[in-house]
């Protein structure tokens, strides 16, 4: 079972597992944090698989969730549903408390009640806070979150640890690093930058462009999740893994790569640092490489070309593409 199956990562993970022949039951509340149309379109693609089932369930609705678990003998739960967005957590804290804390407890407790012993969940690189430079290791410092969103993700890790210790569940958290690609979230910078550049509008660049991100292409993330599932029997009962690219990119280099993929120059407005944001991220991935063969391959240049090609097709944008 995959929660948040109509979301960006949930959709791609479900598609990969369905294509491999697994039976997938997906749930999603289809909330309106960003356009529900792209969620509906992702869902329609998943419904083409005969081995896919779906229910529009909100993880905050405990009774509905418990009824679903009681009626379905799930072998594995991949919990990807959450209220996303770092900056939005400054404006709507209760939504994060509901979805990312109570919703998380509802899902993991439903697993316990129905004897589901394997639980994978999405954490985030944001738990590392605003560390300057260096590679972020899973056993590094994570006690100074910059946002409520990051704090809820750290809380998820602690809750999962307690369930593993108390009830013998295998709980594994994945700290995703700046995931991007086709069918992505429209609120993410690369998505909004693409739309603005195509329209000739100005893009906002925070901290005057002095930021670095470990951008990770969606196919690398999905391959990692699939490899992890195949190795679950060989992994410990509780573990946190970074899933990143291990190749941090300066924001200005990222923008240049996006310009090259689109074939147009960006108009840039440099702005101060935003509250809740971080300057630098870089994932240490040696643990994931060792334990389940995680091996990210896609460069930012190639990944952005794939994204722009999809974006132009999905939104039916007329533009002369550069050679890809």
Image: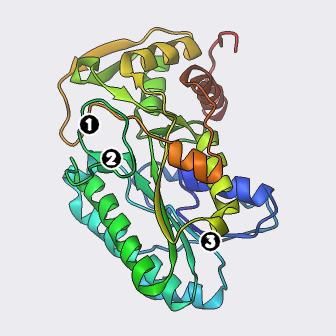
Kind of element beneath mark 1:
loop
Residue 282 to residue 204: above or below:
below
Residue 38 visible somewhere in the drawing: no
Q: 237 or 35, which lies in front?
A: 237
Residue 93 is left or right of residue 166, and the answer is left
The CA distance from mark 1 to mark 2 is 8 Å
Kind of element beneath mark 2:
helix
Residue 172 to residue 10: above or below:
below
Q: Name the disc covering residue 1, or none.
A: 3
Other-residue count near label 1 (Cα within 10 Å), few / some / many at <14 / 14–19 / ≥20: many
Residue depth check, mark 1 versus mark 3: number of the one nearer the observer: 1
Mark nearer the N terminus (1 vs 3): 3
Residue 226 is left or right of residue 18, and the answer is left
Kind of element beneath mark 3:
loop
Q: Are marks 1 and 2 in contact (CB under 8 Å)?
A: yes
Q: Residue at x 59, y 41 (%)?
A: 218
Q: Are marks 1 and 3 in contact (CB under 8 Å)?
A: no
**Relative image position of residue 291 (x, y in whole percent):** 60, 53
Mark nearer the N terminus (1 vs 2): 2
**Relative image position of residue 301 (x, y in whole percent):** 57, 19
Quarter of the rendering occupied by the C terminus: top right
Residue 213 visible somewhere in the drawing: yes
**Location of mark 2 (residue):** 126
The CA distance from mark 2 to mark 3 is 25 Å
Residue 131 is left or right of residue 14, and the answer is left
**Location of mark 1 (residue):** 278
Q: Residue at x 62, y 73 (%)?
A: 76
**Relative image position of residue 8 (x, y in whole percent):** 54, 49
Other-residue count near label 3 (Cα within 10 Å), few / some / many at <14 / 14–19 / ≥20: many
């Amino acid at each position: 079972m995959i929660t948040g199956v109509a979301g960006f990562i949930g959709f791609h993970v479900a598609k990969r597992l369905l294509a491999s022949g697994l039976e997938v039951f997906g749930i999603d509340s289809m909330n309106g944090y960003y356009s529900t149309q792209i969620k509906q379109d992702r869902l329609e693609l998943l419904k083409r698989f005969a081995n896919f089932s779906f229910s529009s369930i909100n993880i905050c609705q405990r009774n509905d969730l418990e009824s679903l678990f009681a009626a379905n003998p799930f072998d594995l739960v991949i919990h990807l549903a959450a209220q996303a967005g770092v900056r939005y957590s400054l404006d709507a804290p209760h939504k994060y408390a509901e979805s990312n804390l109570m919703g998380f407890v509802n899902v993991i407790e439903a697993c316990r009640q129905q004897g589901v012993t394997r639980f994978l969940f999405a954490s985030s690189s944001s738990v590392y806070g605003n560390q300057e430079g260096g590679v972020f290791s899973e056993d590094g410092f994570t006690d100074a979150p910059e946002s409520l969103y990051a704090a809820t993700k750290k809380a998820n890790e602690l809750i999962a640890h307690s369930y593993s210790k108390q009830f013998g569940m295998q709980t594994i958290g994945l700290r995703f690093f700046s995931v991007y690609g086709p069918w992505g979230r429209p609120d993410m910078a690369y998505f909004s930058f693409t739309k603005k550049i195509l329209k000739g509008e100005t893009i906002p660049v925070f901290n005057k462009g002095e930021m670095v991100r470990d951008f990770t292409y969606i196919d690398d993330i999905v391959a990692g999740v699939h490899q992890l599932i195949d190795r679950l029997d060989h992994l410990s009962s509780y573990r946190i893994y970074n899933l990143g690219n291990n190749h941090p990119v300066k924001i200005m280099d990222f923008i240049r790569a996006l310009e090259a993929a689109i074939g147009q120059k960006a108009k840039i407005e440099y702005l101060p640092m935003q509250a809740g944001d971080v300057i630098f991220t870089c994932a240490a991935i040696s643990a994931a490489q060792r334990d389940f063969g995680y091996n990210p391959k896609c460069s930012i240049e190639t990944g952005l070309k794939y994204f722009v090609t999809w974006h132009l097709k999905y939104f039916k944008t007329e533009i002369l593409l550069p050679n890809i």
